[in-house]
Each structure stands twice: as C-alpha cells, then as structure tokens.
Amino acid sequence: MNLAYLAAGVAVYLVAFVLRSVRWKDLVCPMKECPVGKMFSLLILGFFMNNIFPLRLGEFIRVNVAGKKLDVTRSGLFATVVIERLFDGLTYVMLFFAVVMFLPFPAWAKGTFSLGAVVFAGLLSFFFFLFKHQDIAINLFKKLPIPSRFRNAAHDIFEKFISGLEILSDVKLLAKIVGLSIAVWITESLLYLSMGLAFDIGIGPLEAVLVMVLIGVGAILPTAPGYVGTVEFMGVTALVFLGKDKNHAFGYVVTLHSLQLLVISILGIRSFIKEKITIGELFKKARESSV
C-alpha cells in the first residue's frame, strides 16, 4: 500500500468536513451567526455518535448538543439537518447522472436514480411551500388530531421547525449551499480515488465518484452503527460491477471505511475536549433522542 496516497486521502477527507461545517454554518446563519470552528466540532460529534449508535441517532444528538451550545431552537436546527440531507441526496443524483454519461450502467439503475431525483426535489419543494406559506401550514397542522396534552408542544415544535427553513427564501445563500454540497462530495470522492491509488485497484475519478455515490445512497437510510455492512455491501457491489476482483474490492472498501471511522473517532475525541462534553452527557442525549 502506498502511504503517500493514504495520507492524501486523509487530508482531503478533512477538507470535506471543513466544507460541511461551512455549509451547516450557512444553513444556521438565518437563525444565528456561528463560527465555523464551533460548527465543525458539533458536526463531528454527530458523526462520531453515528458510529456508536444505530439509526443515525447522531443527527439528533448533534441537534440536541448544538441547541444548547448555540442557544438556538432544536427544532430549527433539525430543519437545517433535514435540508442538509436533501441537498446531499440531490447532489448524489446529479453526480450519478454526470458520471453515467461516460460509464455504462443498467437502465433500471438510471430509473431508480430518476425516481430519487423526483423524491428529493419534491421534498425540497414541500419544505419551500411550508416556509413560504407558514400561516396555511400552521393552520393545517393545528387541525391534525394530536392528543390535547401534546398539542401545544407539537405546535411549538412545528413552528420552530419552519423557522429553520428560512434559508429557502434567500436565493444567493441557497446557491451557495448548492455549490458547497457539490464541493463536499467532489472533495470526498478524492478520498476514494486516493485509496484506489494506494491499493492500485485501477479506478479513475469517474469510477471513484460512482463508488462514493452508491455507498452514500446506501447510507442515507438509518442503518447499523457506523454504517457497518452497508458501506461494504454497496462499495463491493459497485466495484464488482466496474469489473474489479471481489476480494480486492472488499479489502479496498474495508480499509477505506476503517480509515473514515478512525479519522472521525480522533476528531470526535478532540471535540469532546474542546466543547467540554463527557461521554456520559452524550449517552444521555442519545437516550433523550430515542424517546
């Protein structure tokens, strides 16, 4: 294994997290101005807890901790995470269709990604409607048959959630989020390319993007802690489709995934220290998020 390519992969992976942090900062900006360094630490905490807990509970823990640290409503922050994930999904679709223009791919897979594009665009349009027509949305929500003891709290959460969608009204900021989303995933694809070079597995930039997109799509849904199993299955499937040896592909994907988990764990411990948060507090947040 070429360690120089391995080091380059770690470097671009770190850059991708910085870009994610800038993007989240811009998503939260309409509610509160926050430094990128603070957003980086809180973002990493969420990723680190995703490696410990299943079902993407790290996203909820990130929101819980950030709400307290930034003094911003958790419902509003959760809305920014939802928008973040929608833009990730749309970016996956965009990159997939850009790549399959040059690589052979079965028609059923193209159809599946076309459906995904409709779903992601539809959800984004729905959230845009919620923010643009808040009074109508709130009135419709109030008509839902919610038990009386939860009704006021549910209405309050819904209204604060809508406040987190404010970015959808700023065209310039929205364009920046699109650009950052593309930059995040193009940068992260360089990790896949660097690891491919380190393993001499014979993938170029387009193949690296395709493998990353298929793994990313598999990880969108709630899965096991650290996406263990999902990453390996989707990664090996993509590489075998590209004509790579299954055993070689498995070694490549397992090493790549292990490197990702290691980097996130080191950064997560750093964030614990910087934010003065204990493991016990995060487990408490996890229990609160799962209720």
Image (cartoon, rainbow, N blue to C red):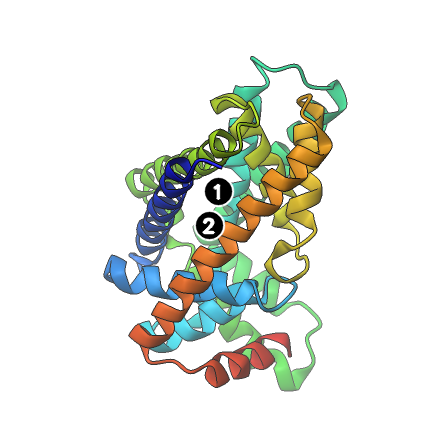
The picture places residue 146, in percent across and down from the top left corner, at 68, 75
Disc 1 designates what residue?
Answer: 87
* Residue at 62% in and 82% down: 150
From the viewer's side, name the closer residue of 281 and 193.
Answer: 193
Mark 2 neighbour density, 10 Å: few (under 14) some (14–19) many (20 or more) = some
Quadrant of the rendered image containing residue 80:
bottom left
* Residue at 63% in and 75% down: 290
SS category of the residue bearing label 2: helix
Is 150 left or right of 5, judged from the image as shown? right
Residue type, mark 1 in image:
Phe
* Residue at 30% in and 43% down: 173
Residue type, mark 2 in image:
Glu
* Residue at 37% in and 74% down: 272
Quadrant of the rendered image containing residue 144:
bottom right
SS category of the residue bearing label 1: helix
Up-down relation of residue 175 to residue 55 (above or below): above
- Specify whether residue 170 is in view: yes
From the viewer's side, name the closer residue of 242 and 214.
Answer: 242
Up-down relation of residue 69 to residue 187 (above or below): below
Q: Which mark is residue 27?
A: none
The picture places residue 58, in percent across and down from the top left corner, at 53, 66
Disc 2 designates what residue?
Answer: 84
Up-down relation of residue 176 to residue 102 (above or below): below
